[in-house]
Image (tube, helix red, strand yellow):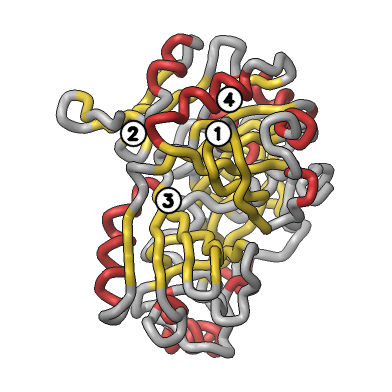
Amino acid sequence: MTEHVDGQALRTPLFEQHVALGGKMVTFAGWEMPIQYPEGILKEHDANRRGCSIFDCSHMGEFMIEGDALALGLDRIVTQKLDDQPIGTCRYGMALNGQGGTMDDLIVYRLADKKWMVVVNASNIDKDAAQFRAELKSGVSFRDVSFETAKIDVQGPLSRDVLKPLVKGIEKLEYYTFATFDVLGERVIVSRTGYTGELGYEIYFPWKKAGRLWDAVLADKRVKPTGLGVRDVLRIEVCYPLYGHELSEAISPLQAGFKKFVDLSKDFIGKAAIEKEMSDGPGRKLVCVVAEGRRAPRQGHGLFSLDGQNIGEIVSGTFSPALGRGIGMGFLKKEFTNTGKDIIFGDEKMRGAAVIVPRPFYKDGTLKA
């Protein structure tokens, strides 16, 4: 069950499993979560890129909504069109504020003609729920089921093979689709989206029974438990955003390079601000940088031109085991964002050389295999 720790941190239903496996627990988005396990992040990275890994993502939020997307206001909250979304598919988009900043990035599942599930970030559950309740019109059914729903992610090239005995018919799922399956006697949603760049699945399981699923997947010796530390490395390698870094209420989807997830053919909150930003051009843009060596750019490091001018800031950075170099994402003044441009990153104590490259850093994943 969800418990407060010292009146602050929350625990997922898998907390005891993480501790038993030797997980190093840290507070993330108000939750006690494993940052890594005893074998370390490099082993966990290898498990995801070459084999199969399992993540506890039960801290994420889930909303259930019933009603007509257009008539009741759901379509207006999200930057992507929902009225033409096929049943059984997932659609990634953003919820914006009136200034075009990102309230959250989220995934919408169309369960039936007038039934939806929206998956939101753990740090934004309360804020998002308040926005949805305020914007949805009377007559819509809205339920926050975040603390009833565990989310277990199984990722990596072997994830399909690992899950076949537990999820009969999982091989039929295509990228960004979902279906309902019988799993360990429970009728649950299983989707195929992923956050690592590899083939991967998400299982939405009853909160109080999640331990059974976790143990069943880990019974396969090909599977490694993995924590938030390697999840961050993996998502940076494929240039996926993390809310509070590449996206925030002060960062628009255009600045972050996610224009393709904003459908200007429809109405949505913040549309006027986005159209103005498109007309004027964003003053800054997200870029990807690769260091010349293993030393990694880190969040908060400045970005500098070769003549020493401060022109931006790193928002995410790590050492990439896949590339064997330091990598990072950061915002630059738009006139300095050309691919191939040499750049400097660092702070008062350290400076390093890097080059701007196209996204993503890692291109050899099995995501759509």
Mark 3 crowd level (few <14, some 14–19, many ≥20, 10 Å Cα): many
Examine the image and state in which quarter residue 64 appears. bottom left
Q: Alpha carbon of mark 2 to alpha carbon of mark 3: how far?
A: 12 Å
Examine the image and state in which quarter residue 91 appears. bottom right
Q: Which circle marks residue 121 in the picture? A: 3
Q: Position of residue 253 (x, y in %)?
A: 52, 69
Q: Secondary structure at mark 3?
A: loop
Q: Are marks 3 and 4 in contact (CB under 8 Å)?
A: no
Mark 2 crowd level (few <14, some 14–19, many ≥20, 10 Å Cα): many
Earlier in the chain: of badge 1 and badge 3, it is: 3
Which amino acid, mark 4?
Thr
Closer to the camera in the image, 362 or 86: 86
Q: Secondary structure at mark 4?
A: loop
Earlier in the chain: of badge 3 and badge 4, it is: 3
Which amino acid, mark 2?
Trp
Q: Alpha carbon of mark 2 to alpha carbon of mark 1: how far?
A: 29 Å
Q: Which residue is mark 1?
A: 185
- Say which of marks 1 and 3 sits in front: 1
Q: Are marks 2 and 1 in contact (CB under 8 Å)?
A: no
Mark 4 crowd level (few <14, some 14–19, many ≥20, 10 Å Cα): many
At horizontal 64% and vertical 53% (from top left) the residue drawn is: 179
Q: How many marks?
A: 4
Q: Which residue is mark 4?
A: 226
Q: Secondary structure at mark 1?
A: loop
